[in-house]
């Protein structure tokens, strides 16, 4: 392959690079980092790590790259030994990058307050060191939040995030004010700055209103919608820098936002046209790479194309066996894709794989497995029934505490285990309830052929519950309200809006009679608002969303709903300002100053 081909990265053998002698200059460090990314994206993980490790204590880009791989392994496994190893590696990476940074005297530091520094005086090594230092600090800060469960770790993480933000601000100013004539590595620097600034802006835009007010109190400001659009715009610009070191990473952040974050926290769909274009571009370079096969599966999943999604997820899962942690991402998605089809056996099997192989949350995985088994309780044999009972007994003992607090979904699962035994060893459609709580209806609702069988299942349980009303053990109203919420969701996505709203209002009317599942009322209020919005009643939607946000406190999974409410209100209010004055780029994205 010719080195002059700008569309594809040259692909060499890693061993050839390891044998290379001589000093590691900036240009060689960048090229070897690009090669490491190519190896990584082609599932050659050990080779990518082996390429970077020998120089990780001398070269800023090798230190950063090796730190990234260690970080990924830590967050994917959640095993203490990998977390400790990653923390040690990233501390070393921070030190290596710091050695190459410009050291300002006290006079120079004071001078920066009253006048803009002369960024042309910085060497190429110094400006890239500032960027690599910021990226290493960001990874170290994130790892700090998960490596220990005390307040001190959160304080340390916050301080590192603040230092990281300061470095990105400096990199942003370097990009804007430096004279780049004759620079050999500007695109690599620019893609890194745009990736960091873009990701930071997206993160800030998703924070709840209370956190935003706190940030404003300590000096930050900015319109949330402008911040999000700026973040997306910066990442787009990073993606446009063909051949740059962090182009693929910009692409992955955008795909993560449009295919995951938008569906978990948002109201509207992500930009699926953009996602498909990015995925197809990268699949042409990495046809067997686990990441883009996984993203392709997710794209089909969010479109509601369940069978193609299962095929792509399975292909991603089977494409490599070196990092089994990637398998867990596929298992999670395959579990829900089969749930959409009411294939409870397959869903149970994938939940079981997660329970036994992943260390993220045994409580959540265990409860998911138990929920799928409950859905086929009439077909369980004696040994499977005994397994189910033991599972419900074991789940509460697996609950974790992070920074002294329980994970909300784990607390929910433990309460449901108690409910299982209190109701005579049964739960009402627990897997469908989980499907709703994980925002699965947003995807499921795109395919009427999937919604109609689910509606039939819910209505059958409504009839069964009516016959058992007198023997409900005090849970009749709670179970009825759950079924009304689930039926309302099915009806709404089948365009039977009037019936759906009647079910949501029915749940709200039972508020004072609910004994246990208080969360059903605010969640139903939110769904009622979404129904109003879908019919063009934006005023009614906004008022109802405000009611859902302000009128209910202390219920299960409250933060999860508040993220959805915040996102919906932001989208609703932004839709009213379309066409108003404001700077835009040629693709319609705002050009406001990044949140720095």
Image (tube, rainbow, N blue to C red):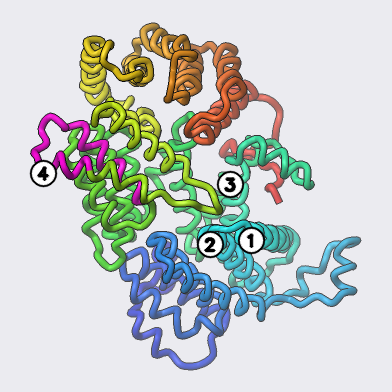
Is residue 8 or residue 517 the one in the foreground?
A: 517
Q: Residue at x 24, y 31 (%)?
A: 425
The answer to whether any part of residue 261 appears in the image is yes
Q: Earlier in the sequence, mark 1 or mark 3?
A: 1
- Tag 3: Cα neighbours inside 10 Å, few (<14), some, or many (≥20)? some
Residue at position x 46%, y 9% in the image? 509
Give the image quarter of residue 562: top right
**Occupied quadrant, residue 317:** bottom left
Q: Are marks 1 and 2 in contact (CB under 8 Å)?
A: yes
Q: Kindly identify which residue carries mark 2.
A: 148
Q: Which residue is mark 3?
A: 203
What is the CA distance from the residue labelled 4 to the residue labelled 1?
47 Å
Disc number placed over residue 152 in the picture, else none:
1
Q: In which quadrant of the rendered image does the N terminus lie?
A: bottom left
For residue 276, which numbered disc appears in the image?
Answer: none
What span is in magenta? 362-389
Residue 488 in the image, given as x and y percentages of width and height: 36, 16
> As drawn, is 490 to the left or to the right of 133?
left
* Dominant secondary structure, magenta: helix
In the picture shown, does residue 66 fall above or below 244? below
- Circles 4, 2 touching at the beta carbon (< 8 Å): no
Regarding mark 3 in the picture, which secondary structure is present there? helix
Snapshot quadrant of residue 566: top right
Report the front residue among 18 and 416. Answer: 416
Between marks 4 and 1 in the image, the one whose residue lies nearer the viewer: 4
Left or right: 321 in relation to 197:
left
Q: Secondary structure at mark 4?
A: helix
């Amino acid at each position: 392959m010719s080195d002059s081909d700008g569309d594809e990265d040259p692909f060499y053998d890693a061993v050839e690079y390891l044998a290379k002698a001589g000093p590691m200059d900036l240009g060689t460090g960048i090229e070897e980092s690009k090669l490491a990314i190519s190896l990584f994206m082609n599932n050659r993980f050990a080779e990518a790590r082996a390429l970077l490790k020998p120089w990780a204590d001398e070269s800023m880009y090798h230190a950063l790259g090796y730190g990234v791989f260690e970080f990924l392994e830590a967050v994917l496994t959640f095993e203490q030994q990998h977390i400790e190893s990653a923390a040690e590696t990233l501390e070393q990476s921070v030190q290596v990058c710091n050695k190459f940074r410009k050291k300002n005297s006290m006079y120079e530091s004071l001078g920066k307050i009253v006048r803009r520094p002369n960024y042309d005086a910085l060497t190429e090594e110094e400006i890239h060191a500032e960027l690599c230092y910021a990226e290493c600090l960001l990874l170290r800060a994130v790892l700090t939040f998960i490596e220990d469960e005390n307040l001190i770790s959160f304080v340390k993480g916050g301080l590192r995030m603040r230092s990281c933000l300061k470095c990105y601000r400096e990199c942003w100013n370097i990009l804007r004010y430096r004279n780049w004539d004759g620079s050999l590595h500007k695109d690599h620097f620019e893609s890194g700055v745009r990736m960091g600034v873009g990701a930071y802006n997206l993160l800030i835009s998703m924070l709840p209103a209370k956190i935003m007010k706190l940030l404003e109190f300590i000096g930050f400001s900015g319109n949330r919608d402008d911040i999000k659009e700026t973040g997306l715009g910066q990442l787009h610009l990073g993606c446009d820098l063909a051949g740059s070191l962090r182009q693929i990473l910009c692409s992955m952040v955008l795909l993560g936002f449009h295919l995951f974050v938008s569906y978990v926290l948002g109201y509207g769909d992500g930009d699926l046209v953009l996602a498909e274009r990015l995925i197809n571009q990268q699949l042409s370079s990495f046809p067997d790479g686990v990441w883009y096969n996984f993203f392709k599966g997710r794209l089909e999943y969010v479109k509601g194309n369940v069978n193609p999604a299962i095929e792509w997820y399975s292909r991603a899962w089977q494409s490599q066996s070196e990092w089994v942690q990637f398998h867990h991402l596929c298992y999670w998605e395959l579990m829900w894709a089969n749930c959409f089809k009411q294939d409870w056996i397959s869903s149970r099997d994938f939940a079981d794989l997660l329970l036994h192989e992943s260390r993220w949350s045994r409580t959540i995985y265990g409860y998911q497995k138990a929920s799928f088994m409950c859905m086929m309780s009439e077909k369980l044999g004696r040994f499977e029934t005994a397994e189910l009972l033991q599972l419900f007994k074991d789940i509460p003992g697996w609950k974790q505490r992070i920074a002294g607090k329980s994970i909300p979904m784990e607390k929910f699962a433990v309460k449901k285990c108690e409910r299982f035994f209190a109701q005579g060893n049964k739960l009402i459609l627990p897997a469908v309830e989980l499907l709703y709580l994980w925002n699965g209806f947003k995807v499921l609702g795109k395919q009427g052929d999937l919604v109609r069988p689910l509606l039939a299942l819910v209505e059958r349980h409504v009839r069964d519950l009516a016959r058992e009303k007198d023997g409900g053990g005090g849970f009749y109203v709670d179970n009825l309200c759950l079924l009304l919420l689930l039926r309302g969701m099915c009806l709404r996505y089948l365009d039977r809006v009037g019936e759906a709203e009647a079910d949501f209002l029915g749940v709200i009317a039972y508020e004072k009679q609910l004994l246990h599942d208080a969360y059903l009322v605010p969640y139903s209020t939110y769904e009622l608002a979404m129904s109003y919005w879908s019919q063009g009643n934006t005023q009614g939607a906004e008022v109802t969303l405000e009611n859902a946000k302000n009128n209910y406190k202390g219920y299960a999974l409250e933060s999860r709903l508040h993220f959805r409410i915040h996102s919906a209100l932001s989208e609703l209010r932004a839709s009213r300002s379309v066409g108003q004055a404001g700077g835009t780029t040629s693709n319609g994205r705002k050009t406001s100053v990044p949140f720095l």
